[in-house]
Amino acid sequence: MRREQSQSSCMTDAEPDIISSLPGHIIDHILSHLSIKEAVRTSVLSTKWRYKWATLPNLVFDSQCISETSEDLLDIKSKLSRIIDHVLLLHSGPIRKFKLSHRELIGVTDIDRWTLHLTRRPVKEFVLEIWKGQRYKIPTCLFSCQGLHHLELFNCWLKPPSTFQGFRNLKSLDLQHVTLAQDAFENLISSCPLLERLTLMNFDGFNHLNIRSPNLQFFDIGGKFDDISFENTSQLAVVSIGLYVNFESNQSRLHGRSSNLVEFLIRLPRIQRLEIQSYFLKYLAMGVVPVKLPTPCIDLSYLSIRINFNDSKEISAALCLLRNSPNLRELEILARPEEQPVPIAHHAYCWEEVCLSWPVMRVQHVRIDGISGIKPELDFVNFLLQYSPVLEKMAVKPALNAGPELVKDLLRFRRASARAEVTYLD
């Protein structure tokens, strides 16, 4: 028995260390799914793992990298700073991504030092989210990072130096809660020749959105602005625009002038998905809304519109979009009730004239959200059901103040499609 136990013991000692014998690419894959805090802890596994974390290409410093056992914000800030200093000091490989996003993070001078360090280690992705305090002024050195492919900033103030000539390799730009001067904004967008994705949310410092970007494919914006124009944006396929401020247009001043809708769409010849949010349809409806556009939206397959059904101008703009989108397959209509009552004259809409020359629509799926059952809303729903012969499903989600009569009204409407299913989402 003793001899058998001894042999068994020798075999156990000779067994290879599975953790240490893992191939390098497997270790890298494991570390890529861990937070910085967990990755550093793997140093105790074996000598092969000791400094493996120091070659991680993606450095993410967020709420997972620090244990918030203390409610003292200064203590949290101090711990976070020490962790970042420690990681950057010992890091020995290329840095592809640097992300700093902690809920207790405020703009501190340490960020300037970390950013300067990164400019010496060409980084591809830079994400900075300042969740508290005033907007953090981006250090000048960041604008020298010509290797950037993705830049994402939250609650920051951008003031590029006069020598800044753009990010020549940038493909994705995400700016939220930022301050940027008008000329600096236009120069930033136009001097990123490879830009494909642009996100702008809640900005100030500029009110005119002049977008010049030949390779731009995705554009998502929400904020307060006076006007928007596109130039050299023939590749744009996905656009979502929300105008967060209501306004009263002077229609007498706009008499005879073509609507913003024409100028807006003529610059988007390859648009595939379009979302019109908040008050942007009201902006598009300014001026004379045409029946037909100079060029139809051939590629548009998805359309989402937030509309005030009591405004005949907005209804005209919505119908113009529908009429000139022959390949539309998905449609979403979101009712936007106004705070102030609209004059009675605006309530009526002449559907007879519309129906006389209306083309067959190819829309298959429709979602209508927020209607209460007023006549302009019901007329619009009735129109969609009558002129959508291949409609498969219409989902209707009522407003909170909608009465039970709405269901009866929906059921009595005739449908051009025998397969059309109308679902009431209570």
Image (cartoon, helix red, strand yellow):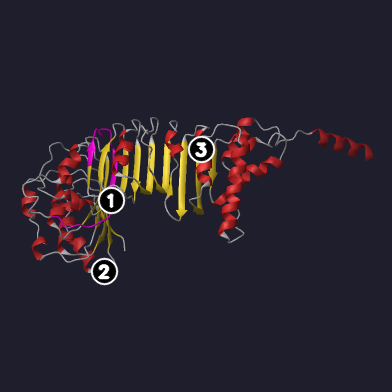
Q: Amino acid at mark 2?
A: Asn
Left/right placement of residue 86 relative to residue 380 reads: right
Q: Find numbered disc 3 in the image and state the secondary structure of the residue it sits on.
A: helix
The disc placed on residue 242 is 1
In the picture shown, does residue 224 fall above or below 15?
Answer: below
Q: Which residue in the structure is indicated by mark 2?
A: 401
Extreme residue toward the front, this view: 162
**Foreground: 39 or 272?**
39
Residue 201: x %, y % from top left: 34, 49
Q: Amino acid at mark 1?
A: Gly
- Residue 242 seen in the figure: yes
Tell me if residue 324 is in the magenta stretch: no
Residue 331: x %, y % from top left: 25, 48
Write down the region rendered in magenta.
229-249
Q: Find numbered disc 2 in the image and state the secondary structure of the residue it sits on.
A: loop
CB under 8 Å between callouts 1 and 3? no
Q: Which residue in the structure is indicated by mark 3?
A: 116
